[in-house]
Image: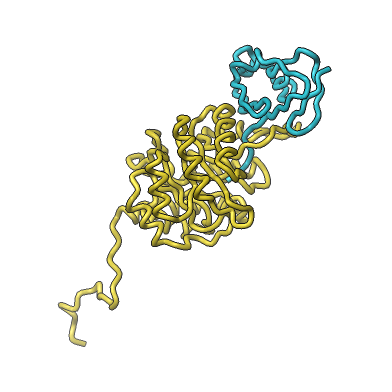
Chain colours: A cyan, B yellow
């Protein structure tokens, strides 16, 4: 297992997991290789890996490693 | 059904995009998504702010839209992500980049706050962040103090709109310095959006009468006792204020001026 930090909390992944796999797990929506949800809708999330943004087009090609720091963000209520 | 619509001949144009409503809504403070959706529809808004925060799994079994992004998509309201909670230019730029990636818009409401007590913009960080974001291709809606000098600086740095505060965020104190807002409007060549401090409909009407191009508010609606009714009030206030501003008000006078002629008055 690969241990990472996800949104500030410890999280375990199967070895070899990619950012796309993690986004699928977290949102419950399968992700196409281009980073868009397979259901055809819009996902509305962004991913930062070790304080750098990973564009959705690279999610499937970005493996996660031990102790990676991942933030997944979305739109919430705000002024 | 709506009872009043903004004349289509008078859209608010920002970054080349025409918006039919001059009321920009925030979404903070609403107790439920359903209530928020109803208030947004009642307001007639076509542009609404959101904050960027860590993803949390939506609660299962909720009727209708389960998250804010879906709600705005469903209502066909354009999204304006903000950088609320950022204290430095570095944080604000990172938040804007996340928002652009997540929401697929290069519009950003730039908020760089000095401290949690006043929530007033930090002018130095704001200028720095505006410059960086413009260079990165963002359309910056700069939330700023009611300072005519700073507002002009932000425009010169490439801000797509300047958004001076009426009063500190969430206070509902209205427009504390109408003279400065008037000065900002008089010198700006980008849209001026009165942002923050609005308490009730007359505050929004005043902003428009002062020549602002739009009004942005959240708390005044979301925390009103009847948010839907207040949202509708703001819709009308913004339209009324805009019409009044363009109609050319009468000058103020020291003494009364009869509107009925004395000529032809019967000798009683």
Residue placed at 68% from the left, 17% from the top?
A: A20
Front residue of B206/B65: it is: B206
Residue B256 visible from this viewpoint? yes
Q: Position of residue B140 (x, y in %)?
A: 46, 38
Front residue of B60/A56: it is: A56
* Quarter where residue B180 is shown: bottom left
Q: Position of residue B179 (x, y in %)?
A: 39, 62
Residue placed at 55% from the left, 52% from the top?
A: B229
Residue B142, compared with residue B57, is above or below; it is below
Q: Position of residue B165 (x, y in %)?
A: 49, 54
Quadrant of image for the C terminus of chain B: bottom left
Residue placed at 65% from the left, 26% from the top?
A: A47
Q: Position of residue B4 (x, y in %)?
A: 43, 47
Residue B20 visible from this viewpoint? no
Extreme residue in the bottom direction: B268
Front residue of B182/B225: it is: B182
């Amino acid at each position: 297992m690969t241990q990472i930090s996800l949104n500030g909390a410890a999280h375990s992944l199967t070895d070899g997991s990619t950012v796309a796999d993690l986004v699928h797990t977290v949102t419950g929506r399968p992700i196409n290789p281009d980073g868009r949800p397979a259901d055809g809708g819009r996902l509305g999330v962004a991913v930062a890996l070790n304080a750098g943004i990973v564009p959705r087009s690279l999610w499937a090609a970005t493996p996660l490693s031990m102790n990676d720091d991942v933030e997944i963000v979305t739109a919430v209520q705000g002024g | 059904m709506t009872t009043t619509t903004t004349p289509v001949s008078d859209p608010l144009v920002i970054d080349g995009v025409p918006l039919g409503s001059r009321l920009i809504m925030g979404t903070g403070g609403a107790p439920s998504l359903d209530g928020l959706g109803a208030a947004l529809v009642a307001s007639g808004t076509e542009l609404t702010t959101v904050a960027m925060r860590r993803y949390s799994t939506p609660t299962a079994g909720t009727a209708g839209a389960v998250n804010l992004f879906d709600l705005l998509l469903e209502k066909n309201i354009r999204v304006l992500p903000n950088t609320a909670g950022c204290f430095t230019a570095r944080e604000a730029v990172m938040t804007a980049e996340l928002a652009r990636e997540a929401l697929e818009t290069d519009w950003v409401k730039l908020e760089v706050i000095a401290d949690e007590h006043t929530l007033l913009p930090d002018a130095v960080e704001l200028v720095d962040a505006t410059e960086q974001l413009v260079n990165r291709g963002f359309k910056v809606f700069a939330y700023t103090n009611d300072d005519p000098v700073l507002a002009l600086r932000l425009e010169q740095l490439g801000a797509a709109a300047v958004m001076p505060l009426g009063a500190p965020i969430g206070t509902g104190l209205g427009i504390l310095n109408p003279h400065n807002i008037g000065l900002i409007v008089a010198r700006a060549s980008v849209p001026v959006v009165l942002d923050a401090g609005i308490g009730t409909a007359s505050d929004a009407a005043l902003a428009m009468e002062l020549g602002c191009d739009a009004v942005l508010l959240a708390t005044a609606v979301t925390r009103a006792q009847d948010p839907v009714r207040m949202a509708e009030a703001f819709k009308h206030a913004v339209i009324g204020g805009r019409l009044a501003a363009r109609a050319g008000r009468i000058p103020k006078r020291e003494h009364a001026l009869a509107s009925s002629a004395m000529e032809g008055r019967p000798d009683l």
